[in-house]
């Protein structure tokens, strides 16, 4: 952990977690660790193992990325206390000593379930500790694709045709549901776990056989599924920053190396390409940007998010795909690249995100104690 300036705000960086995106989180957190200004902040690294252990660690970025951080001898078991009297973390030393340490802000660089879905945000709200990123409701709503789709529709944000069913529904009525999906969505369609990120458990169905296989695969990740009509279009993404005022970048474009933008394509095989700005007419770029800010505000996002869209070929329709409330910060991730394209370095991005977290906390405190 960095502690070059003992009077600087203590910033806890959470990484790892119990989701299927554990490995990506470790790399995203490394970007924060490498670029946060040690003269302005005391950085405290807290890793969460896949089995849910919290460890305060002095791991290097390389050790975080390769997973070897978990077995370092000087790791200290810890928790973030939900008591506002503590306003921070509790460390359990091997000699039996218990240490309390104040935290001024938390960066939950966690992706997917049990990190990006409102759970950790709820803990930090109870603790009264400011944190980077969206609040409890926006995090939970954006994680659940069925809830997000319903909110998009309610706020007039165009989306593809979709449906949602639970495991209970599918176990009881699989055949009629499949027929309904064929009639209403047609092939090809995408089958997705409602609550999973980075294309985990997502597959493309082209007939009844692949539809059944896709359902079986998605149910391994969640008890609720979302079915969406395929869109023949460009996938473009906007970075959005801000609290009450949403500042969206022009979109960038992902040129996928597969039939759709898979988890491996995003994070492992490096086949996909990033184009900033996207290959679209200026008017269409502006339209996507406007819809990104509208979607961000409609779902109550704060701090940061990445808004993903399709621009349909032929019609030019802009259709929202999803909002990621803590997007990847890996070297190939779109959010930091888009922000760099408008002149914000990674260090500047971190400063701005911490500032937004502190501003939001101050406003909440004024409301509840003013």
Image (cartoon, grey):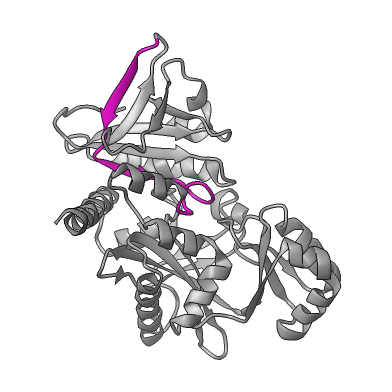
Residue at horizontal 51 percent and vertical 25 percent from the top: 70
The span shown in magenta is 96-118
Above or below for 340 versus 287: above
| Quarter occupied by residue 39 | top left
Residue at horizontal 59 percent and vertical 56 percent from the top: 196
Residue 139: percent from the left, percent from the top?
A: 44, 58
Is 272 positioned to the left or the right of 11 in the image?
Answer: right
The answer to which of 311 and 245 lies nearer the viewer is 245
The question of residue 1 being in magenta is answered with no
Residue 142: percent from the left, percent from the top?
A: 48, 64
| Residue 190 shows in the view | yes
Above or below for 21 versus 344: above
The question of residue 117 being in magenta is answered with yes
Is 272 positioned to the left or the right of 348 in the image?
Answer: right
Which residue occupies the extreme bottom position in the image? Answer: 315
The answer to which of 157 and 189 lies nearer the viewer is 157
Which image quarter holds the N terminus? top left
Residue at horizontal 51 percent and vertical 45 percent from the top: 24
Residue 58: percent from the left, percent from the top?
A: 37, 24
Which image quarter holds the C terminus? bottom left
Residue 99: percent from the left, percent from the top?
A: 31, 20
Which residue occupies the extreme top position in the image? Answer: 95
């Amino acid at each position: 952990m960095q502690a070059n300036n003992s009077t600087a705000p203590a910033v806890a960086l959470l990484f790892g977690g119990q989701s299927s995106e554990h490995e990506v989180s470790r790399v995203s957190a490394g970007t924060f660790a490498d670029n946060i200004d040690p003269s302005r902040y005391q950085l405290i690294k807290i890793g969460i193992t896949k089995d849910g252990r919290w460890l305060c660690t002095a791991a290097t970025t390389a050790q975080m990325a390769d997973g070897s951080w978990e077995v370092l001898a000087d790791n200290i078991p810890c928790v973030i206390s939900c008591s506002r009297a503590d306003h921070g973390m509790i460390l359990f030393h091997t000699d039996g000593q218990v240490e309390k340490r104040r935290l001024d802000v938390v960066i939950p660089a966690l992706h997917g379930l049990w990190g990006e879905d409102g759970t950790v945000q709820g803990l930090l709200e109870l603790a009264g500790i400011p944190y980077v990123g969206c609040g409890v409701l926006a995090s939970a709503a954006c994680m659940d694709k069925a809830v997000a789709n319903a909110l998009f529709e309610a706020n007039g944000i165009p989306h593809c045709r979709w449906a949602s069913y639970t495991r209970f529904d599918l176990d009881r009525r699989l055949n009629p549901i499949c027929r309904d999906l064929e009639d209403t969505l047609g092939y090809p369609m995408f089958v997705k776990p409602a609550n999973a990120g980075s294309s985990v458990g997502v597959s493309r169905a082209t007939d009844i056989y692949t539809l059944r296989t896709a359902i079986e695969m998605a149910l391994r990740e969640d008890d609720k599924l979302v079915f969406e009509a395929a869109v023949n279009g460009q996938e473009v993404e906007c970075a959005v920053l801000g609290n009450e005022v949403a500042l969206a970048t022009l979109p960038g474009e992902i040129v996928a190396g597969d039939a759709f933008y898979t988890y491996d394509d995003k994070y492992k095989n490096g086949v996909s390409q990033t184009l900033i700005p996207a290959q679209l007419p200026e008017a269409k770029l502006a339209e996507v940007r406007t819809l990104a800010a509208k979607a961000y505000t409609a779902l109550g996002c704060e701090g940061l998010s990445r808004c993903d869209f399709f621009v349909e070929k032929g019609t030019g329709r802009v259709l929202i795909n999803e909002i990621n409330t803590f997007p990847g910060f890996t070297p190939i991730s779109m959010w930091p690249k888009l922000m760099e394209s408008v002149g914000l370095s990674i260090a500047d991005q971190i400063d701005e995100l911490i500032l937004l977290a502190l501003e939001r906390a101050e406003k909440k405190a004024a409301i509840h104690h003013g």
